[in-house]
Amino acid sequence: VQLQASGGGLVQPGGSLRLSCAVSRRPFNFSVRSWYRQAPGLQRELVASIIGGGTLNYADSVKGRFSISRSKDGSTVFLQMNDLKPEDTAVYYCKLTRGPVEYWGQGTQVTVSS
């Protein structure tokens, strides 16, 4: 299983981006779908996750600004990011979990700067 993350880029503070993470092949059943990010010099941190049928979790720093969702068939997970701040600058990674196995995407750079 390969994950293809896309949608990153350069955006001004207050702007929006939508990240996508597409799964290369079936099956699309995953117990957890998550987005992480890693800024230079910092540890990778959990940004948002969908657990099972739909329980959503968000890091306190992104609550009210970011929204995680999935496509109907489960093949893609999205991260809608609004009101972006310079501190959101990082490489964003998707992670999908099936049982004991974790699958990571390659990362997509998000830079928030004026």
Image: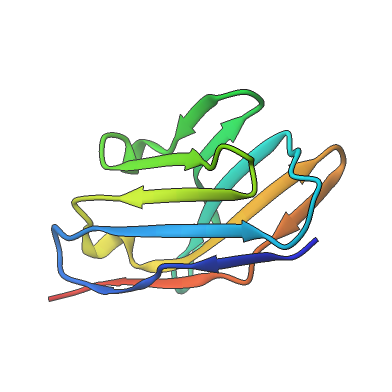
Residue in the picture at 36% in, 36% down = 60
Could you say where residue 26 lies in the image, as x and y percent from the top left?
79, 51
Quarter location, residue 44: bottom right
The residue at the point 26 percent across, 34 percent down is 64
Left or right, 71 with respect to 104, comes to: left
- Dividing the image into 4 quarters, which one contains the N terminus? bottom right
- The furthest residue to the right: 100
Asked whether, in this view, residue 71 is left or right of residue 29, the answer is left
Numbered-mark total: 0
- x and y percentages locating residue 109 in the rendered image: 43, 74
Quarter of the image where the C terminus is located: bottom left
Judge from the rendering whether residue 7 lies leftward or rightward of residue 56; answer left or right: left
Judging from the image, the colouring scheme is: rainbow
Residue 39: % across, % down: 44, 67
Q: Residue at left 35%, top 49%?
A: 80
Q: Tell me where residue 70 appears, x and y as whole percent.
A: 53, 41
Is 11 placed left or right of 97 in the picture?
left
Placement of 40 over or under 33, stated as above or below:
below
Q: Residue furthest front?
A: 73
Q: Residue at x 62, y 67 (%)?
A: 4
Given residues 75 and 41, the one toward you in this image is 75
